[in-house]
Image (cartoon, rainbow, N blue to C red):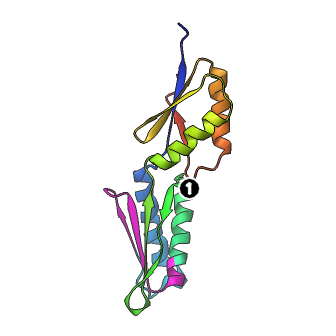
């Protein structure tokens, strides 16, 4: 019986790095000239893995979101894993938005990845959905390397991480 090799495909963000980035955003909006005298808030909720932004108007909300993206990028958090909701205009023109953080591969995306790998023409490759991650296995390690290169080329709407390579 031939030994099969495998690797796991997953996604997620480091919540501590997100917390650090949110703290940096707080410091920056406290010192930036265009945010002086405004009431802009940014709240990070670890349990729901979401960030709530609130600003005086839609323009400042956009600026706040831009600063958040910049700080997250500098901290090494993949911006592809941000699930930006629609902005809501509340009373007195205040704007609110919730940004979710993707912590796993959802079923719809997982099915797309499985279908793409099966249609890719790789020999004897098996893909199994295991909760919020995928396990790809094949008898040849070279084939697994080809699958990794194939998955890196595709745009799946999130940052894929490859681990547990055996």
The residue shown at (40%, 84%) is 39
**In which quarter of the view is residue 113 placed?**
top right
In the rendered image, residue 14, in percent from the top left (x then y), is placed at 44, 49
Q: Residue furthest top?
A: 1
The residue shown at (48%, 73%) is 86
Judging by the rendered image, the residue that carries numbered circle 1 is 80
- Judging depth in this view, the residue of 98 and 2 nearest the camera is 2
Count the marks: how many? 1
132 shown above or below 86: above
Q: Which residues are magenta?
A: 42-61
- Judging depth in this view, the residue of 18 and 88 nearest the camera is 88
The residue shown at (52%, 59%) is 72
- Judging depth in this view, the residue of 34 and 4 nearest the camera is 4
Q: Is residue 118 left or right of residue 99?
A: right
In the rendered image, residue 87, in percent from the top left (x then y), is placed at 47, 76
Task: Determine the secondary structure under disc 1.
Answer: helix
27 shown above or below 123: below
Can see residue 105? no
Asked whether 132 falls inside the magenta stretch, the response is no
In the rendered image, residue 47, in percent from the top left (x then y), is placed at 31, 56
């Amino acid at each position: 019986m031939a030994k099969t090799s495998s690797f796991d495909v997953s996604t997620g963000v480091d919540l501590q790095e997100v917390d650090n980035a949110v703290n940096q955003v707080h410091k920056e909006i406290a010192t930036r000239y265009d945010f002086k005298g405004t009431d802009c808030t940014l709240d990070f909720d670890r349990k729901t893995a979401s960030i709530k932004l609130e600003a005086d108007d839609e323009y400042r909300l956009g600026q706040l979101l831009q600063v958040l993206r910049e700080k997250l990028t500098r901290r090494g958090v993949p911006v592809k894993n941000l699930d930006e909701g629609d902005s809501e205009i509340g009373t007195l023109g205040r704007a609110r938005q919730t940004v979710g953080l993707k912590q796993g591969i959802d079923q719809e995306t997982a099915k797309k990845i499985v279908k793409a790998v099966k249609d890719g023409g790789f020999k004897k490759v098996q893909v199994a959905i295991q909760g919020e991650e995928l396990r790809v296995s094949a008898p040849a390690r070279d084939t697994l390397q080809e699958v990794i290169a194939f998955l890196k080329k595709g745009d799946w709407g999130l940052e894929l991480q490859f681990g547990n390579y055996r």
